[in-house]
Amino acid sequence: MAISSAWLVFCFLLLRHAVVELEASHHVYRNLQVSSSPSEHQPYRTSYHFQPPQNWINDPNGPMIYRGLYHLFYQYNPKGAVWGNIVWAHSTSTDLVNWTPHEPAIYPSQQSDINGCWSGSTTILPWGTPVILYTGIDPQDQQVQNLAIPKNLSDPYLREWVKSPKNPLMAPTSANQINASSFRDPTSAWLGPDGTWRVIIGSKRHTRGLAILYRSKDFIRWVKSQHPLHSAKDTGMWECPDFFPVLVNSELGVDTSIMGPDVKHVLKVSLDNTKHEYYTIGTYNLGKDNYVPDKGQVDSDSGLRYDYGKYYASKTFFDSAKNRRILLGWINESSSVNDDIKKGWSGVQAIPRILWLDTSGKQLVQWPIREIEKLRGHEVHLPKQVLEGGSALEVSGVTAVQADVEVSFGISELEKAEVLNPSWTNPQELCSKKGASVKGGLGPFGLLVLASKGLQEYTAVFFRIFKGHNKYVVLMCSDQSRSSLNNNNDKTNYGAFLDVDPSREKVSLRSLIDHSIVESFGGKGKACITARVYPTLAIDDKAHLHVFNNGTENVQFTLSAWSMKKARLDLESKL
C-alpha cells in the first residue's frame, strides 16, 4: 500500500507534464473588483475569530497540521459578500489563533471543477504527505470528486497545489445511480488494516440521507461500495459528513485510521434541509464496512449537536503534534444580505475546539483550544457571593465587547425548581417560550452580554433548572430576542438540555464575546451555543456585561472575566 501511494505522489511531482498546474491566483483574479465598498466604521468585525478582510466565507475545508504549521482552507468568494465564485482560500498558523494569508490553493481550472471548487478534506498519507479530495462542479453542473496534491513538499506553507489529470476520480453515472446534484463534500479518508483506503461522500436518495462509501488501493482509482457506510430516513441531503474515532476514557485524540476495542466512532452530518448538524456515536464494523449508532443515539435532526446555535459545515482533524482532535466550524450570519453587502463581508470561523468522548460514552465534550487564552489581558474576578432573585450586577473593568468570561453557579434550594412539563421536549422551543425576561423559580440566571447602558439591547445566555421525573433537568438558553434594535436580523433563540446534576456539581458557563459573536460553553463543554448578534447601541466602548438572576430564588456565583487582545488575522490579504 505504501509503495503504490508513494509511487503515485512521486509521479505527480516529477512528471509535471502529466498534471494540471495552478497558476498564481492573482493571474486569474487580477481584474476582480469587490462588489461593494465596505463602510469604514466596522463595529461588528471580530478581533480574535478568524475572518478575511472582506467578502463571503463559509465551510472550513481540509484543516490539518503539516511540518509544525496549521493549515486552514475555506470556501471563499473573491468577488463579494454573497455566495458564489467559490475557491479554496488558504491561511496558516503556528497556534490556531494568529493567521498568515496565502493565495487561494484551489480554484476552477479543469473541466471537473470549472463551475466551482466546493468543500472537501485533507488526508495525511502514512509517510506524512497531505492530499486533498474536494467536490468540483463540472460543465453539466454535476458534482464530482477531485484530487489535488502539493506541488512542493519542502514548502511548509504548501502554497501551490496541482490537480490529478485523472479528475474526476468519482462521479455520478447511469450505472451507479448517484444523484448528480447531491454528491459532495468528501471527508478525510481512512486506511484499513487490509491496506484499503475508504472515504465517504454526502448524498441523498429521495428523502434518505446517505454517506456513500468508496474504496481504493492507491488513492486514485476508487470503487463505489454497494451499500453506504450509513443512512437515515427523512433527513435529506447530508452535507459535510465527518467520520472519525474517539478514545474511550481519554481526552486524547487519535488518527482517523485508528480502530480497535478502545475506540468508538463518530458520524457527523450537516443537514441541507434544516441547516443544522447532528452526530451519533457508535461502532464501525470493518468486516461489513458499515457504521451502527449505539442504542439510544438519536439518528435525526433532533439528535446531538456540536453546537445548538449558528454553527454549520464543521470539520475535525487530528493534531498529531499535541495528540488532540480539533473541531472547526462556520458561524453563518444573522444579518440581512443587504447589510452583509453594506459591511462588505459575511461569515466567520468559530474558535477551534478540542473534542473528546464524555465519560458517559453517550456524548462528546468540547472546549476552546488552550492557545486562545494567550489573548487574555486584564482580569476581573468576583469571588463567591449571593445573587438575589430579580437582580443583576454589572461586571466593570473588562472590555465587554471583546472578552472571555467564566462563571459558575451554585444552587441550594433545589426543591423550589419548577416542575418540567412532560411535553417540553424541544429545548429550543422551551427557550423561546421562557426567555430571559420570563421569571421562574431557579432561573433564568446567567450573563447579559453585549448589553446597552439601559438594557434596551442585550443577549442573554442563561440556565433554568426544572424538576423532572426522579432528576433535575438543566436547560441552557441563548436569547437573542433583544440583541438588537435592528429587526432585519435573525433573532432566533437557541437552547439545549445540559447533562449536569445541580445537586452534585455547580452549573458552569464560559462565553467568548467578540463584537458580533457570542460562543458559549455550558457544563464544561457538554453543550455549546453560538449566537450571531448585531446590536445598534451596545457596540465598541458602549457595550456592558452583567451577571443576572431573574428567578425568585437566590443563587451563588463566582466569576472571572478577561479583556481579550486582538489576534493577528490576515493583516495583508493575499485574496
Image (cartoon, rainbow, N blue to C red):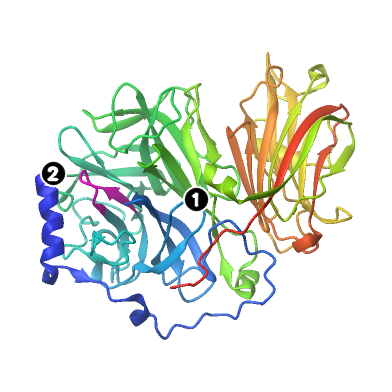
Determine which residue is flagged by label 1.
329
Foreground of the two, 15 or 421: 15
Q: Quick check: can you spot residue 426?
A: no
Which residues fall within the magenta stretch?
121-130
Relative horizontal placement of residue 430, taking residue 290 as reference (left or right): right
Residue drawn where x is 51% and y is 43% of the image: 353
x and y percent of residue 486 in the render? 76, 64
Foreground of the two, 331 or 262: 262
Q: How dense is the environment of label 2, judged by Cα within 10 Å: few (below 14), some, or many (20 and up)?
A: few
Relative horizontal placement of residue 46, taking residue 354 as reference (left or right): right
Relative horizontal placement of residue 492, taking residue 351 as reference (left or right): right
Q: Nearer the viewer, mark 1 or mark 2?
A: 2
Foreground of the two, 166 or 181: 166
Amino acid at dot 2: Ala
x and y percent of residue 102 in the render? 40, 68
Q: Is residue 128 magenta?
A: yes
Residue drawn where x is 44% and y is 43% of the image: 326
Cα separation between marks 1 and 2: 32 Å
Q: Earlier in the sequence, mark 1 or mark 2?
A: 2
Q: Secondary structure at mark 2?
A: helix
Determine which residue is flagged by label 2.
2
Amino acid at dot 1: Gly
Q: Looking at the image, which residue sits at the far top?
A: 470
Q: Quick check: can you spot residue 334?
A: yes
Relative horizontal placement of residue 466, taking residue 180 as reference (left or right): right
